[in-house]
Amino acid sequence: MLPVRNNIENINIIAMPSKTYKIDFDKNRARGIFDDVKSLTQAIYKILITKRYKFEIYDWNYGIEIDDLIGMPKEYVKIEIERRIKDALSIDDRIEEVCEFEFFDIFNDRCSLGVKFLVKSIFGNFTFSLEV
């Protein structure tokens, strides 16, 4: 039997660096390294373009589900997108809050919906926008 120690006073919590490879999504290759806000921005983008439950390499908490919203009423979609983005980004401990959502129409061949929101992170605040 192992001895039980209740002395947790000497535990140091160390924040891991947020360095990651810079991904060029147009050329499907990694080039260089990102850190801090740029790393977090890329992580947010990757989370929001990944379909949840589709890829076995990712945990079931990674990604977002939006395919079922196609063809639904726009006001319902706005409410659900906001909730689902907050849920999807809650897995990243660098993000403190996601708020101030704004929606806008994108008139292209698909008539899409755009979303812009404020990300409050440990690196500071920044806005993020995406076509959903």
Image (spheres, rainbow, N blue to C red):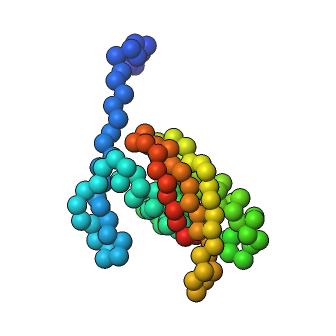
Image coordinates for residue 5, horizontal then vertical, percent: 40, 14
Residue 114 in the image: x percent, y percent?
Answer: 59, 68
**How many labels were placed on the picture?**
0
Give residue 12's quadrant in the image.
top left
Residue 50 position (above or below residue 41):
below
Specify the quadrant that holds the N terminus: top left
- Farthest left residue? 32
Q: Along the line of sight, which residue is nearer the eye, 38 or 52?
A: 38
Can residue 121 be seen from the camera position used here? yes
Q: Position of residue 76 (x, y in %)?
A: 75, 64
* Image side of residue 10 versus residue 56, left or right: left
Q: Is 59 left, or right, of 39 in this rendering?
A: right
Q: Going 49% across and 54% down the picture, which residue do you hit?
A: 127
Residue 30's place in the image compared with 108, above or below, is: above
Q: Please state if 82 lies on the left or on the right of 30 as rendered.
A: right
Q: Does residue 61 appear in the picture of this structure?
A: no
- What residue appears at the point 39 percent right and 59 percent down from the top-left corner? 42
Q: Measured from the top left, where is residue 57 in percent x and y? A: 43, 62
Taking the spot 35% from the left edge, 35% from the top edge, the residue there is 15
Q: Residue at x 36, y 28 (%)?
A: 13
Q: Nearer the viewer, residue 91 or 22?
A: 22
